[in-house]
Image (cartoon, rainbow, N blue to C red):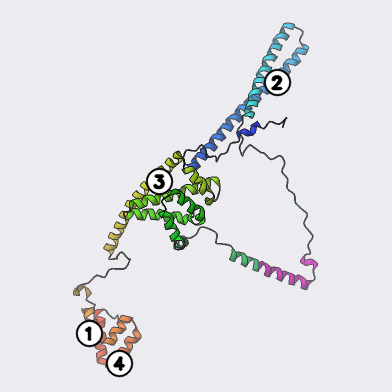
Amino acid sequence: MSGFDYSKWDNIELSDDESDCHPNIDKESWFRMKHRSRVERETREADEKEKLEKANKEDKDRIAEIMEQLVELEDEEDAEVLNEEVKDLEEAIAKRDQRIDDMEKNKKWNVDNMCHVVEERTMIGKSKDKTTKSDLPPDLAEAQAEKEKSRAAAAAAEAEAAEPAVGPRSERAEVLSYASFVETHEDLLEKYIAIKGLDETRDLLHAKGEILLEEHASSYLLLSCLEDEMNGFHEKMWHSACQSQIFFYILELAQSLRRPPQDVVIPFFRRISEAEYLAGFLDAVNTFIVKIEKRAVEKRKEMDEEAKRKKAMGVSEDGEEDLVELSAEERMGPGGLDPVEVFESLPEAMQEAFQSQDTEKLKAALVGMPAEEASYHMKRCEDSGLWVSGQ
């Protein structure tokens, strides 16, 4: 269409364009660097344009001043000199205008400078007349007030029940959520880990991406890598690490494109088929494996130290206290009697009462025997520490 020059739209610049991003460079850092470079370039261009326009204005003012002098000037030689000055000034202005035109024509367009607000207004409609309580009879006004109060209370209760809790989830809630996710989808996660080919991995992620591309799934793969390395299954760990990095790359790509992870599965596998991108991916896998190996060594040391600490405290690995056999001297009660020997010498009814820690059974056992015998056994229980008087 004649009369319109669309060439300036050939230079639209996208800050999140990753076509020129090397696979070994972090995309977010690359985007920030491009944005910073763009801002600095635009600042330089604006400063240069301002200087050119300022110089043009000064030269134009000078030309206007010379023109006024020429009207009153009679000497031809002086007039010729002034005309030469005017000619030089006009040439300088033309060069600056040409530079400004070139800058505008080759200007890089982006979301910040492509459009601007020409006019902004806010329209407020007239409020409709409403009948107030004061316009109603007293009995109807009171009934209306009660009705509004009950309606507001019901709406507040409904909103409180419907809205989820605001704020970060507690650690316990996160653990329960992860445990529930693993319990529900563990078979699918193990199936994903076991896949060997990229095509099968792509198909499964595309079909089950709403489950596999979750944060809990990524955590499961990370823990699987660490567990395999600690148990000596290095080859299995290496494969799990590859599958884990596929997760990471897809989630990073989805974040940069502002798309759901499942939408970028096919583009990711199309890109990884390129040799350069595949090399960058494998470098990332090797870096991740080194971190897993280092963490496995540290975790093993931590577990050994914890086992030593529990052993020193007399606690077994399952968290229960180990039973330590004491010598007869160490078992002696306050009266010098061994509680084990005293317990074995008690009547069966009293032994059952002590084992179940039931005072009512103990009282019944004592009532059922002669007072002298009951006193004898209770005295021995106190001297051995089996029974504390007054409690």
Distance in Å between CA atoms under marks 1 and 3: 70 Å
Question: Disc 4 designates what residue?
Answer: 368
* Crowdedness near tag 3: few (<14), some (14–19) or many (≥20) residues, C-alpha within 10 Å: many
Three-letter code for the amino acid on which mark 3 is drawn: Val
Question: Disc 1 designates what residue?
Answer: 345
The disc placed on residue 285 is 3
Secondary element at image label 1: helix
Distance in Å between CA atoms under marks 1 and 2: 123 Å
Q: Please state the horizontal and vertical placement of residue 212, each as a whole percent of the image.
A: 48, 55
Answer with mark 3 or mark 2, whichever residue precedes in sequence.
Answer: 2
Secondary element at image label 3: helix
Three-letter code for the amino acid on which mark 2 is drawn: Lys
Distance in Å between CA atoms under marks 3 and 2: 65 Å
Q: Please state the horizontal and vertical placement of residue 150, each as a whole percent of the image.
A: 68, 70
Q: Are the residues at dot 1 and dot 3 in contact (C-beta closer than 8 Å)?
A: no
The answer to which quarter of the image holds residue 306 is bottom left
The answer to which quarter of the image holds residue 381 is bottom left
Q: Are the residues at dot 4 and dot 2 in contact (C-beta closer than 8 Å)?
A: no
* Crowdedness near tag 1: few (<14), some (14–19) or many (≥20) residues, C-alpha within 10 Å: few
Residue depth check, mark 3 versus mark 2: number of the one nearer the observer: 3
Q: Residue at x 45, y 38 (%)?
A: 276
Question: Disc 2 designates what residue?
Answer: 60
Distance in Å between CA atoms under marks 4 and 2: 127 Å
In the picture, the quarter occupied by the N terminus is top right
